[in-house]
Image (cartoon, rainbow, N blue to C red):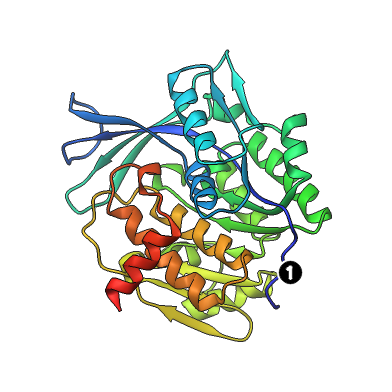
Amino acid sequence: MSLPPVRPGKIVTMGEILVDIMAVERGTGFRTPLNLRGPFPGGAPAIFIFQTARLGHPAGIISCVGDDDFGWMNVERLQRDGVDVSAIRIDDDQVTASAFVRYREDGDRDFLFNLKRSAAGQTALDPPARALLADCGHFHVMGSSLFSFHLIDEVRKAIEIVKANGATVSFDPNIRKEMLNIAEMRAGLEFMLQYCDIFLPSGPELMMPTEAKTEQAAIAELLGLGASCIVVKRAAGGASYYDATRALDVPGYPVAEADPTGAGDCFGATFVTCLRQGLPVEDCMRLANAAGALAVSRQGGMEGISSLEEMRALIARAS
């Protein structure tokens, strides 16, 4: 299947807006007192759409936050950079979602989430959300947002609306090990594969939704489900692109890592945005790799957002 045509309109995403609160010391878990940094504005959909807006593409997000400092910090940050925040509902009966993050010695991370019982869990297709979807040319979904049957149903309704209008859909599984035991999330991952045009897994996520034993077999199976292209993020190893007629490996850019939070979100936003702006796939991949590299070099998810000029400067230095 060839790449889908570009429908005019905003890139829109739907899902959690939260704050990241990060442990200063490395270790496991949160069962003893420790020093913390934050709050940082975040949430995978929020980081994705923030990066989209930074690249100059019209962008909006459907979400819900509490009427509290954490919520307003996020809303004001997104609005300041040009994101359409008209479909972010402020709920004075709920608190803004949060994620506590701790880093292990091997670089892996442990998360303690407050999602389902937070304002993010109340995200719904209210009239402002439906108005935003009416102007949607591309809809992006994060697997981390499929944390309840309520959210799965709302995302499904949104996809039906945008698909009926000719918009395309991208899907990043964005699986956290802390979420794998959530039955709703497994169901959400399965249904999203039926609708996405652009599939953006990270490493092992490519194999999870398939019965395949090899990467190539998994790619063939997923393309057979209807995806136009698959982009596999390989962290410092760069990324690989696949569609029905070609495969492309693009190396990453070495940087000193400060925090991997949001790197995949910045990568995905840059790839999707640049593709919609008409850049060749090879350029989209290089810029997405640069966006991911710049993101890991900074502490905090939204702090890792970069401009097109910064991405091109990194690529030029590596040439």
Q: Is residue 97 left or right of residue 135?
A: left
Rendered location of residue 191, percent (x, y): 67, 54
**For the point 59% across and 57% down, which residue is it?**
171
Residue 207, visible in the rendered structure: no
Rendered location of residue 86, percent (x, y): 66, 32
Residue 72's place in the image compared with 47, above or below, is above
Residue 126's place in the image compared with 184, above or below, is above
Residue 189's place in the image compared with 80, above or below, is below
Q: What residue is pinned by disc 1?
A: 5
Q: Is residue 62 left or right of residue 251?
A: right
Q: In the image shown, does 120 or 280 lie closer to the viewer?
A: 280
Residue 39, visible in the rendered structure: yes
Rendered location of residue 36, percent (x, y): 23, 29
**For the point 52% across and 24% down, which residue is it?**
118
**For the point 44% across and 67% down, which residue is it?**
287
Q: Is residue 205 left or right of residue 279?
A: left
**For the point 82% across and 54% down, which residue is it?**
165
Q: Disc 1 marks which amino acid?
A: Pro
Secondary structure beneath dot 1 equals: loop
- Give the quarter of the image for residue 14: top right
